[in-house]
Structures are given as C-alpha cells and as structure tokens.
Image: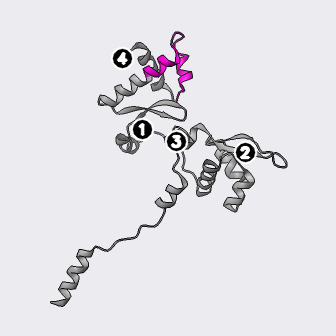
C-alpha cells in the first residue's frame, strides 16, 4: 500500500463518521483529489481481496471503515458496540415521509400522518436524522425538512437515491399467500380412496 493509502486508512479507522474525499485530501498537502481517489480504491481492494473483518464503505457522501456484516451479530451480542435508542412508530413514519417527500413542510407531514408532528420533528432533529433544508414560498414561509447525513450513514446509503422505490415497497409489504403443494393434495386424495 502507498503511504497515502496508509494515512487515509489511519484517518478512517479513527473517525467516528464517514469522511469525505475533501476532508481526506487535507491530510496531505501534496495529494490531489485524484490521488485520494486512487488511494481509496487501493484501500478498498486491500480489504476486499484479503481476509479482513472490516471493509471500506462509501456512505453518506464519504467513506468509513466498518465491521463486515457477517461479524456484526457476534459483536453486538458481546456488547462491544453502542446502539442508539430505537425510534418510535411515529418517528419512523415521519422519517419515512421526509425521506420520500423531501423537501417537505410540517403541514404536509401532518396531512399525510393525520396527527401533529411538532414533537416528533424536534426529536428527529435532536438525533441528527433530519435537518431544515430551506423555506417554502407558501404563506408564512414554513420550514422545509430533509434527511441528514446521519440518516444515510445509519442506513448504509450513499445518497437518498439509493432508497427503495415506492413500487418496490408496495410489493415487499404485500402479505405472503401460501401456495398449496399439489403433490400433498394428490397424496391425500389417493389415501382417501383406499
């Protein structure tokens, strides 16, 4: 590995969040963005083609070294990692509305959910999952909300375009219908005749 790739590895290992290529480029004054990209690719190949318990992932607009999914359950069972408190159903619903409709105002969120969303919006902002992304041109110029980088990081997404499309969700959420096994029905029919 090149010295730049080793420097990037050290920075990514010590960081608690994804680091952007721009942030990584500040580590070496002589490195160009192209040099950083080449070093990142070298690191990715290093982790992908040699047996390691971690991998380099691109998410939330940056890069981060994370545990491979196959080891995550064992690490969680041992309580080595800290998990954020779970979100309530109301928070999940509101977060989904924001993720798929962003930028979206409080009034539209409340219209979709049918309940007040002030407390939930405040909670999601405090957790760093959503942020104010602008103001609407509507009367009173209400705030518009969008997802924050932490939302993408927690879901392991590069950007919002990586979210499942609404058509995919509709299919995935349909109840499973059991298909009868024709062989079993035929065997039951034969036994009954005997």
Callout 3–callout 1 Cβ contact below 8 Å: no
Number of the front mark, 1 or 4: 4
Residue placed under numbered mark 2 in the picture: 144
Left/right of residue 106 with respect to residue 79 in the rendered view: right
Magenta region includes residue 32 = yes
Q: In 3D space, how far apart are the residues under numbered discs 3 and 2 (Cα atoms)?
A: 22 Å
Left or right side of 187 for 90: right
Residue 173, given in percent of the width and then of the height, sits at 49, 61
Query: Residue 112 occupies which quadrant of the picture?
Result: bottom right
Viewer-nearest of discs 3 and 2: 2
Closer to the observer: label 1 or label 2? 2
Q: Name which residue lies at 44% across and 15% down.
A: 4
How far, Cα to Cα, is label 4 from label 3? 29 Å
Q: Which comes before the other along the chain, label 1 or label 4?
A: 4
**C-alpha gap between disc 3 and disc 1:** 17 Å
Task: Give the residue displayed 59% in from the left and 37% down from the top.
Answer: 149
Please give the name of the residue rendered at 71% of the width and 59% of the height, measured from the top-left corner: 111
Q: Against 142, is 184 above or below? A: below
């Amino acid at each position: 590995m090149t010295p730049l790739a080793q420097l990037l590895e050290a920075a990514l290992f010590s960081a608690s969040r994804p680091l952007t290529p721009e942030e990584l480029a500040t580590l070496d004054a002589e490195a160009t963005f192209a040099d950083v990209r080449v070093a990142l690719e070298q690191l990715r190949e290093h982790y992908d083609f040699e047996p390691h318990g971690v991998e380099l992932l691109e998410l939330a607009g940056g890069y981060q070294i994370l545990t491979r999914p196959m080891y995550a359950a064992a690490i969680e069972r041992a309580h080595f990692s800290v998990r954020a408190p779970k979100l309530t159903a109301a928070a999940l619903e509101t977060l989904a509305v924001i993720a798929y409709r962003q930028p979206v105002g409080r009034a539209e969120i409340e219209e979709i959910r049918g309940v007040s969303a002030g407390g939930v919006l405040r909670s999601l902002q405090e957790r760093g999952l959503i942020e104010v992304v602008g103001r609407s041109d509507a009367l009173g110029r209400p705030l518009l909300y969008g997802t924050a980088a932490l939302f993408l990081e927690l879901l392991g997404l590069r950007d919002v375009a990586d979210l499942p499309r609404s058509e995919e969700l509709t299919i995935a959420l349909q109840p499973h219908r059991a298909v009868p096994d024709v062989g079993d029905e035929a065997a039951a029919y034969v036994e009954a005749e005997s």
